[in-house]
Image: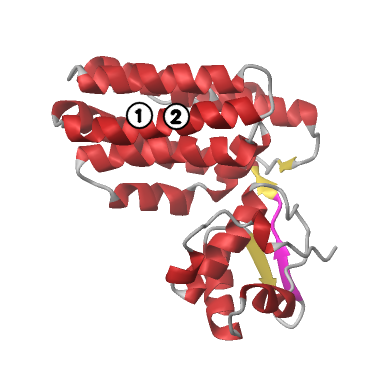
Amino acid sequence: MNTRLQQSDFLQANAAAQPKALTAYNYIRHAIITMKMEPGATISEKETCAELGVSRTPMREAVLRLAQEGLVNVVPSGGTFVNSISLRGVIEGHLIRSSLELRMVRIAARSYDAVRDRDFDLLMFLQGDAAKRQDYDQSFAVDNDFHRLICAMAGFPDVWQTIHNATGQLDRIRRFAIPRSGYFDEVEQEHRAIYDAIRAGDADRAHELLRRHLDDIAAVVEYVFADRPGLIVQEPGFDLSTLEVMLAPAAQ
């Protein structure tokens, strides 16, 4: 399958100010995460270069980065294809994300600065706006921005980039599951509770609330299995009966 995107599908408003390789990377990654490019889709280098107005060199840099993240498969002389969603990759991404974020939220609570309240208030406004309009893409972006904010509040903004690089497979199922019932109310309430604990300087409570928040990924995986059988590829050695045990963040 050959999938052509429209540039309106690309959410990066400041794309013109970015390096061209980063523009191409964000454009294709967004399409993969939002399932505008589904598993098995062919990525046309020529068409994407023309759509974005970039040369083949930054396009190839973008594809290489996506391949390193496990999102695409480059077949020599055969083309570039969107990879299947790997259960192993989902779990690995979740383990990296939860391990790092649970440390970040403790540090954020211990080093709280009220200057961040404006950032949080803006995110909550955008989250509410997305809920009213049932805008899944904006809601997903704001959700990620909240977790990025936690890393920034802890004083380690680059940790979010490490998480981002490791969670491509995880992000695909998180985005796919947004339409499930109750998502919008749940995420806003949980984000507010986590931030309130950070603002109060209660590191233990912030940690516990974030742990519960991230623990929801087991339900997300089960939702995807039920709603779209075959979308997630199960590798040998991964028993779904132990899914919750594998995905539950360890208490620290």
Q: Which residue is mark 1?
A: 121
Q: Position of residue 202 (x, y in %)?
A: 20, 16
Q: Position of residue 229 (x, y in %)?
A: 81, 34
Residue 18 in sight from this viewpoint: no
Q: Which residue is mark 2?
A: 125
Q: Could you tell me which residue is drawn at 50 percent across and 23 percent down?
A: 187
Q: Is residue 81 magenta?
A: yes
Q: Which residues are magenta?
A: 79-84
**Within 10 angstroms of label 2, few (less than 14), some, or many (20 or more) residues?**
few
Q: Could you tell me which residue is drawn at 53 percent across and 79 percent down?
A: 58
In the image, what residue type sits under mark 1? Asp
Q: Regarding mark 2 in the picture, which secondary structure is present there?
A: helix
Of residues 250 and 183, the one drawn nearer to the viewer in this rendering: 183
Q: Could you tell me which residue is drawn at 53 percent across and 58 percent down?
A: 69
Whether residue 59 is situated above or below residue 122 in the rendered picture: below
Q: Which quadrant, please, contains the C terminus?
A: top left
